[in-house]
Amino acid sequence: MESKNKQKTIKQKIISNVMTTSILLGALLIALMVISNIISTRHILLDNMQMMVKIASQDISANLHLLADRIANLSLEEVLTDENADIAAKQNILE
């Protein structure tokens, strides 16, 4: 009977050790995957954001240049600078 109890306890110890090791390995692999995914996501986002910021700044620059040209053209309109011109004519130019 004692040998059966010893076998049960040895069997239970082996099972518990294998389960504990498996759970720890699973948790370690999950943690490793999460960390590596976070790191790779940061690098990918950084690369994409740099490119997007460059494109956005070029677009803003082009829009500001067009806006400055339009303002310069409007300042040359005689109707807008004439004090005697009626509001309808000025509004017509602005539209």
Image: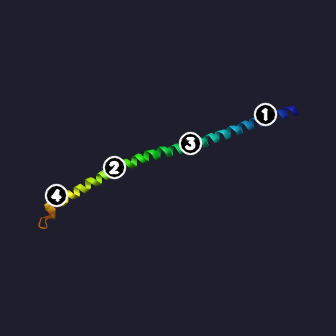
Q: Quadrant of residue 77 in the image?
A: bottom left
What residue would you read off at disc 3?
Answer: 36
Separation (CA) of disc 2 from disc 4:
29 Å
Q: Is residue 15 left or right of residue 31?
A: right
Q: Secondary structure at mark 4?
A: helix
Badge 2 or badge 1: first in the primary sequence: 1
> From the viewer's perspective, is residue 83 above or below residue 63?
below
Q: Position of residue 83 (x, y in %)?
A: 13, 67
Image depth: mark 3 or mark 4 in front:
3
Q: Mark 3 belongs to which amino acid?
A: Ser
Q: Mark 4 belongs to which amino acid?
A: Ile
Name the foreground residue: 75 vs 31: 75
Screen quadrant of the C terminus: bottom left
Q: Is residue 80 left or right of residue 50?
A: left
Q: Which mark is residue 93?
A: 4
Image depth: mark 2 or mark 1 in front:
2
Residue at 62% over, 39% down: 29
Separation (CA) of disc 1 from disc 3:
37 Å
Q: Position of residue 14 (x, y in %)?
A: 76, 35
Q: Mark 2 belongs to which amino acid?
A: Gln
What residue would you read off at disc 1?
Answer: 11
What residue would you read off at disc 2?
Answer: 58
Q: Secondary structure at mark 1?
A: helix
Q: Position of residue 44 (x, y in %)?
A: 47, 43
